[in-house]
Image: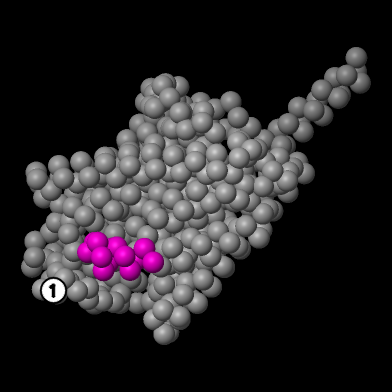
Amino acid sequence: MIMYDAMASVVEESKDFVNGLDTVWVLLGAMLVFWMQAGFALVEAGMTRSKNTANILMKNFCDFMCGSVIYWVLGFSIMYGAGTCFFGWEGFGFIGSDSNIPAECSFIFQTMFCATAATIVSGAMAERTKFSMYFVYSIVISALIYPIEGHWSWGGGWLADLGFHDFAGSTVVHLCGGALALAGAMVLGPRIGKYDREGKSRAIPGHNLSLCVLGVFCLWIGWFGFNPCSTLAATGYANAVSISHVFVTTNMAAATGGLASLVYTWLVDGKPSLSMVCNGVLAGLVGITAGCDTVSIGASALIGVITSVIMCISVSFIDKVCKIDDPVGAISVHGVGGFVGTVLCGAFCNPAIDGVDCGSSSVLGRMGVEALGAAAVGVFAFATGLILFEIIKHTHGLRCDRRIEEEGLDIYEHGEACYN
């Protein structure tokens, strides 16, 4: 009896130790994903003009602050609460958890993802959006749009039932943000001077590529919380293998994505473009996020290359053919990159990887499910975003006055400039 009690005590202590390590691992991931907010702020500020820098930085603050509060009050319950296959609901405030980590740990980790989806939109709508109205749509995204589509796959909804796989958010986070960015940029219209009378695109260079590069490095670091920590556990040999694998595939796709955009711009434009290499790295990271746990290292390298090249083509197509002004390339990097990466997850899923369940044995079947899920989320986010932005446009107004846009949003919207 004494021996049994001693063994029971050891088991209980071991369980506490395991839960503690898993909790610290996920909280570390939450901190790294939070660091991505700094990355987005620097990338967007560097790729836009100096007269709007304070406005850009303020919007990135607001994304996180509003997202934290609204996701706690409503969003987390809609996304993970019990409900239908389309919409979750379990009261106000975050719901409990029966997993290996505390409810608060799960909640704060998912809060960071919600804030990331919201902040993607600001880059495509930069330099011409009323700050007050940015508050409004940031709240709606965090409260309803992101949680509803997130419930479909991560909250046990209809996409999860189909076997849709998106490990860390190529579709749930990035495609959602990219589709909303497309809707916002379309409703806003291009910046003054972006297109001449014949409709030819004019370059409007960002004021500081150094900030942009620093931001990309911040995002690259933050992605090691975004992807590996989505395992939600760090104890045991199987989890150690999985985490290590996700680290490698994430980094490989980022590296090959950057190299692919370097080569592409060198061949097409005659010179390697630093700004496009920045976006190429991000496109590779976005693309691998869905399948970083299910594809081989070689496949992750291919995903980085394919996603990056398609992103480069998309940037030119959206700008020159569609005449949609996206100052930072958010639509192509996150929207197009998220869709392509999700489909490629189905194409390259490798059952030989320990613990991987690829669902359908048919490659075309897996790609079909992945394409369906990505398309459903993209259409939903774009449609709801379009309705939201049109309502704002025809009520209070979404775009700032011409004089404010020409002279800069910093002084008129915030009463201070980033550079004095």
Observer-nearest of 47 and 371: 371
Q: What secondary structure is the magenta-colored segment mainly?
A: helix
User: Please, is residue 311 above or below residue 240 in the view?
Assistant: below
> Residue at image x 45%, y 28%?
158
Q: Is residue 116 visible to the viewer in this orientation of the structure?
A: no
Work out which quarter of the rendered image holds the N terminus and state it: top right
Instruction: Pinpoint residue 241: horizontal percent, then vertical percent.
Output: 73, 49
Instruction: Pinpoint residue 139: horizontal percent, then vertical percent.
Output: 28, 42
Instruction: Pinpoint residue 92: horizontal percent, then vertical percent.
Output: 37, 26
Q: Is residue 250 visible to the viewer in this orientation of the structure?
A: yes
User: Please, is residue 273 above or below residue 118 in the view?
Assistant: below
Observer-nearest of 302 and 70: 302
Say which element carries label 1: loop
| Quarter where residue 54 is shown | bottom left
Work out which quarter of the rendered image holds the C terminus and state it: bottom left
Q: Which residue is mark 1?
A: 198
> Residue at image x 54%, y 54%?
288
User: Please, is residue 300 above or below residue 207 in the view?
Assistant: above
Q: Residue furthest top?
A: 1
> Residue at image x 10%, y 73%?
197
Crowding near the residue tagged with mark 1, few <14, some 14–19, many ≥20 C-alpha atoms within 10 Å: few
| Quarter where residue 3 is shown | top right
Observer-nearest of 103 and 360: 360
Question: Which residue type does callout 1 highlight?
Answer: Glu
Q: Which residues are magenta?
A: 313-326
Q: Is residue 295 magenta?
A: no
> Residue at image x 35%, y 66%?
315
Q: Is residue 165 left or right of residue 211?
A: right
